[in-house]
Image: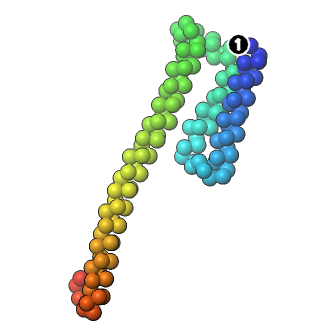
């Protein structure tokens, strides 16, 4: 890999790293998501600098074309990020369902109280929750 390509890749990695840190600093990215993105950004910075040792590791693993190993590892990293996001979506959808049910119950109680208040009827103690 040419030195110019390495410099460009390191600069891209540094830009991603700076973006993730800035999003963390401004609290637009939560810490639970930031860890994987920080690892990805550091990998983008380190990979072009360590390309020769990484090529040797790929050959030791029996991979004839080292970029194929790096692409596979990148895909696995993205799958881990997608898995984490899927877990959070599942958790949030359950929370939304529970909150929606609680809002419906509260709305029903408020409507019942408004009806009773409009009739000037005292609310029996056993119906108060």
Which residue sits at x=27%, y=83%? Answer: 115
> Of residues 5 and 74, which is closer to you in this image?
5
Color theme of the render: rainbow
Residue 67 horizontal/vertical position (percent): 58, 14
Q: Can the viewer see residue 98 in this picture? A: yes
Measured along the vertical axis of the image, is residue 15 above or below residue 120?
A: above
Residue 126 percent across, percent down from the top left: 22, 85
In which quarter of the view is residue 6 placed?
top right
Rendering quarter of residue 57: top right
Q: Quadrant of the C terminus?
A: bottom left
- Residue 74 placement (x, y as % from top left): 54, 25
Q: Quadrant of the N terminus?
A: top right
Q: Secondary structure at mark 1?
A: loop
* Residue drawn at x 50%, y 36% as measured from the top left: 81
Q: Please provide percent x and percent y for residue 73.
A: 53, 23
Query: Among all residues in the image, which is located at the extreme front?
Result: 118
Q: Residue 60: tell me if it is visible.
A: no
- In the displayed structure, 43 sits above or below 27; it is above
**Looking at the rendering, which quadrant does residue 12 occupy?**
top right
Q: Is residue 101 left or right of residue 85?
A: left
Say which residue label 1 marks: 1
Q: How many numbered discs sit on the rendered protein?
A: 1
Q: Residue at x 60, y 50 (%)?
A: 28
Label 1 crowding class (10 Å Cα cut-off): few <14, some 14-19, many 20+?
few
Q: Is residue 69 above or below residue 91?
A: above
Choose between 108 and 118: the one closer to the eye.
118
User: What residue sits 54% from the left and 46% below the top?
Assistant: 32
């Amino acid at each position: 890999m040419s030195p110019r390509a390495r410099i460009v890749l390191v600069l891209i990695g540094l830009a991603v790293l700076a973006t993730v840190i800035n999003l963390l600093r401004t609290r637009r990215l939560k810490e639970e998501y930031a860890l994987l993105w920080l690892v990805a950004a550091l990998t983008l910075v380190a990979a072009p600098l360590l390309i020769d040792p990484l090529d040797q590791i790929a050959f030791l693993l029996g991979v004839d074309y080292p970029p194929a190993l790096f692409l596979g590892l990148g895909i696995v990293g993205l799958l881990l990020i997608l898995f984490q996001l899927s877990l959070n979506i599942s958790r949030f959808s359950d929370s939304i369902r529970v909150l929606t049910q609680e809002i419906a119950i509260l709305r029903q109680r408020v409507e019942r109280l408004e009806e009773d208040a409009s009739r000037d009827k005292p609310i029996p103690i056993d119906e108060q929750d």
